[in-house]
């Protein structure tokens, strides 16, 4: 009876999986040993179990075989990778030199490490500092002018607001004064207005001598009987004779 074909898939049963691993591992190590002896081949075998346990075999030593493998990996076909690595190394070297140059320039601008500089380099540094100082002053002046303009706008706005409030206050004061004058006159039940106590007797003063025009009351003397009878007989009103 022939042996059935084993389907290549993960064995779900943990015990069966462990037994199969042990058997096939031993068989693989045996085949590697036989291949190295029968064919005079340099064989290296490394196995890690599911639990992380290491099993290895090296006919000439695992380390020696791995070093040989690394040397053989850099074939002429991989020259592009090596060239790219060298290009990256050169780029890193350039960036490092540029970074050091920028740091040195920064120290010079701060007035540090000026000993190695000659006269020409110091003059160039002085020009750079003067130019930077001029630009800084121009920017500062521009910012100050912008702030002053903002303050003027705020001042004009506050002045207009103050003027508006002042006019409003004056209008309210005039309205209150008119209301006070009207409230000083109170109408009585017959529709007559009583003026404010301060205006009750506007003509209350000493009249002085009174001038009467066109009428004079006739006063007869004690002994004038003729005039008295004449008045009674003629019924003439004395004092209206022109």
Image (cartoon, rainbow, N blue to C red):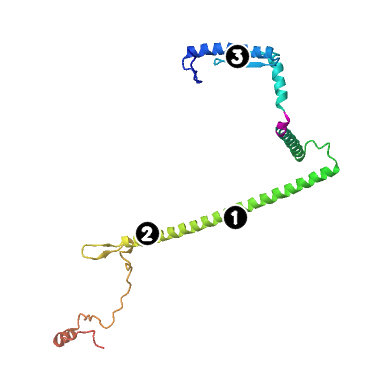
226 left or right, relative to 141 = left
- 166 or 64, which lies in front? 64
Q: Quadrant of residue 189?
A: bottom left
**Residue 207, percent across and down?**
32, 71
**Residue 1, percent across and down?**
47, 12
Which residue has dot 2 on it? 176
Q: Which secondary structure lies at badge 3?
A: helix
Residue for point 60% across, 16% down: 47
Q: Residue furthest left?
A: 233
Residue 86 in the image: above or below residue 178? above
Residue 207 in the image: above or below residue 228? above
Crowd class of label 1 (few under 14; some 14 to 19; many from 20; radius 10 Å): few
CB contact under 8 Å: marks 1 and 2: no
- Mark pair 3, 1: CA separation: 89 Å
Q: Which secondary structure lies at badge 1?
A: helix
236 left or right, relative to 151 = left
79 left or right, relative to 217 = right
Q: Which circle, 3 or 1, is nearer the viewer?
A: 3
Residue for point 60% across, 14% down: 28
Q: Which secondary structure lies at badge 2?
A: helix
Q: Quadrant of residue 36?
A: top right
Residue for point 57% across, 55% down: 152
Which residue has dot 3 on it? 28
- 8 or 53, which lies in front? 8
Residue for point 14% across, 87% down: 233
Mark 3 and mark 1 lie on one chain; the one further toward the N terminus is 3
- Mark pair 3, 2: CA separation: 115 Å
**Residue 112, percent across and down?**
78, 36
Q: Which residues are magenta?
A: 75-80
């Amino acid at each position: 009876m022939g042996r059935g074909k084993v389907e290549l898939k993960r064995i779900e049963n943990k015990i069966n999986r462990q037994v199969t691993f042990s058997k096939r591992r031993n068989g693989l190590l045996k085949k590697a040993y036989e291949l190295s002896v029968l064919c005079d081949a340099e064989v290296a075998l490394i196995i890690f179990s599911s639990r992380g346990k290491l099993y290895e075999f090296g006919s000439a030593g695992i380390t020696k075989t791995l070093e040989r493998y690394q040397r053989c990996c850099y074939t002429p076909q991989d020259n592009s990778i090596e060239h790219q690595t060298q290009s990256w190394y050169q780029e890193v070297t350039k960036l490092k030199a540029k970074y050091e140059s920028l740091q040195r320039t920064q120290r010079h601008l701060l007035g540090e490490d000026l000993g190695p500089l000659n006269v020409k380099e110091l003059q160039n540094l002085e020009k750079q500092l003067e130019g930077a100082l001029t630009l800084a002053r121009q920017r500062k002046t521009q910012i100050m002018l912008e702030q002053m303009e903002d303050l003027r706008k705020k001042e004009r706005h506050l002045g207009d607001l103050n003027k508006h409030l002042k006019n409003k206050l004056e209008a309210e004061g005039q309205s209150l004064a008119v209301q006070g004058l009207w409230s000083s006159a109170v109408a009585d039940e017959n529709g007559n207005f009583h003026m404010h106590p301060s205006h009750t007797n506007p003509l209350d003063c000493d009249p002085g001598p009174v001038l009467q025009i066109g009428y004079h009351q006739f006063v007869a003397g004690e002994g004038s009987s003729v005039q008295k009878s004449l008045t009674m007989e003629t019924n003439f009103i004395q004092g209206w004779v022109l």
